[in-house]
Amino acid sequence: MTVLPIVARELRVSARRWGTYVLRLGAAGSAIALATIVFLTSTQGGPPSSLGKVIFTLLSGFVYLYALLIGVRVTSDCISSEKREGTLGLLFLTDLKGYDIVLGKLAASALDSFYALIATLPVLAIPILLGSVTTGELWRTSLALVSTALFSVCAGLFVSTFSVSERKSTSGTFLLILLLTVGVPILLTIWMAYSPPARSLEWLLALSPIASIYAALANTPQVPQHIYWISIGATIGYALVFATTSALAVPGVWQQRVESGRIRLGQPGDDASHRKEREERQQLLDSSPTCWLSGRGRLRGIWLWVFLASVAGCWIWAYVEVGREMLDLGMSFAWMYFVHGVLKVFVASEAVRTYGESQKQDALELLLCTPLSVRDVVNGQQLHIFRYFRWPFLTVLTLDLLLVMVGILDGQGFSSGKRSTVWIILIVIAFFIADCVVLMLVGLWRGLIARNSRQALVSTMARVLLLPWLLFGLAHLLLFFLGKEIGDRASLYLIIALSLLINGIFGWHSWDSIRSHLREIAAARYGGPTPSRFWTWLGRTWGRLTASRKSLHRPTGFSGSP
């Protein structure tokens, strides 16, 4: 009998899949490109050893972030999707055990991502040739990256075992990783700062997975080596606990399914306090049924308010600790970019979920069978997203303007150019609103055509937020090769132009595609979507070429008896 048969099968399938090699080549190529850009655009005159340390630290940071979020992308929905489809119980009709299924799912979901991670490790060895990076640092960093990736995928597997909804499983995996990596160290640091007897528990900070990469990159006497090994042991221990718990729990949770008839906490009750809400929901149902369908549940937006309340609490605590330095221009921009970035992720996630859930629940086909037009359906989805984010957005924009006003009156970092600072803040706010609108349109379209919401979310964020900065970096690299320098003002104009161009292209394409192909994609499960004109032309051309080639080799006649 084959040991771990599902794992053996996934290894054979992965060896024959072209995507494995493409992902591995892309990861190594991206790491080489990043190292090349840093090497070419670095300031001249410095020692090569310091440049090697910068390249090594920068590459290690990016690869560590990738390893930390692998579980959110690949394993957070690997078992919960089987439970939603009702196919997990079929595996237990065989002789497979719980650990066979868990390890098989782990190999099927995370194998390609592990290959991509391993492909970046040889690139990390290149800075050794420049000096200031030792072989020991390379091996310690590589072990920290691999152990972190193992922790991440096992965390996703653990959350997916006890979840059914894709959205809850993905967000739960992210919160679990964030809690163990950043949340616990922050709480311990605050506790030790306000409680001197608790400083003897400083070694507990090493239980965070992020302590391993910090100790590996620091390489100073101030960071003892036992901190690194404690963190490595804790990270691998987390992974083993998550994987073992999942293997033991899978045989008992395979019957867990989505219950459609249960009473939800978000539904209004029958008491008088919810009477007004029922009336508002009824009016919304009469005016826009699509918006009513997408906006069910009163507690769905609570996480956004929790995030904003947490950020406000952290800012107030930091202001009490450091004083007026929190009103500095750089500090204000840092907080604004952080809050705006997280809100953009919320917008893209909600836009992706809107059409994705409707299509999975067959609600989209039912809506299109009603007298509602495609325009009514699309406008209803957009109205839902507007209603979902209107008050959080107004709160954030009000706080941004209030922060600017207080900073100008206080004079911390604003005295040299108050007018230019105000214009910069207004530009940042305008681009924040524009990015959110385009993220809504692209997220609706990608959620409609992607295989799952995680893939749709990643593709949406990459198109709207990552692509302009990638083109900006390539433009800087091209100008460097041409021997030309670009100033700060020209760089600002360049990134604004690229952002407007990318937002315009993808926003218009998504808007037009939704209105033109919504019915075709909604009916794809019955007959398949209509292929694009390019692939239709390519298929017909290939058919004509192969047909003419066969006719040339076909005999014109025959002789003799058959």
Image: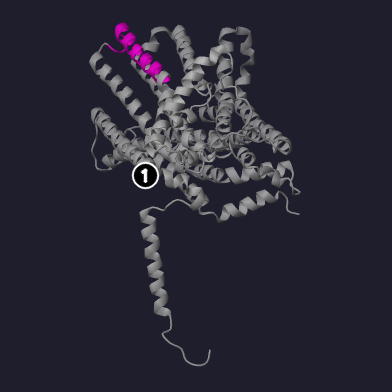
Q: Which residue, given by chain and number where applicable, does mark 1 sit on?
A: 516
Report how many numbered discs are placed on residues in the image: 1
Give the image location of residue 357, x and y in percent.
Answer: 52, 36
The furthest residue to the bottom: 560
Q: Amino acid at mark 1?
A: Ser
Can residue 127 be seen here? The reply is: no
Residue located at (47% from left, 28% from top): 292
Check disc 1: other Cα within 10 Å, few if <14, some if 14-19, many if 20+.
few
Quarter of the picture containing the N terminus is bottom right
Question: Residue 410 sits in which quadrant?
Answer: top left
Q: Nearer the viewer, residue 521 or 225?
A: 521
Classify residue 485 as left or right of residue 519.
left
Q: Which residues are magenta?
A: 392-414
Above or below residue 329? Residue 431 is below
The secondary structure type at the circle numbered 1 is helix
Q: Nearer the viewer, residue 455 or 60?
A: 455
Can residue 376 be seen here? The reply is: yes
Classify residue 198 as left or right of residue 288.
right
Give the image location of residue 181, x and y in percent.
Answer: 57, 26
Above or below residue 181? Residue 23 is below
Give the image location of residue 18, x and y in percent.
Answer: 51, 54
Question: Residue 394 sits in which quadrant?
Answer: top left
Question: Residue 380 sits in which quadrant?
Answer: top left
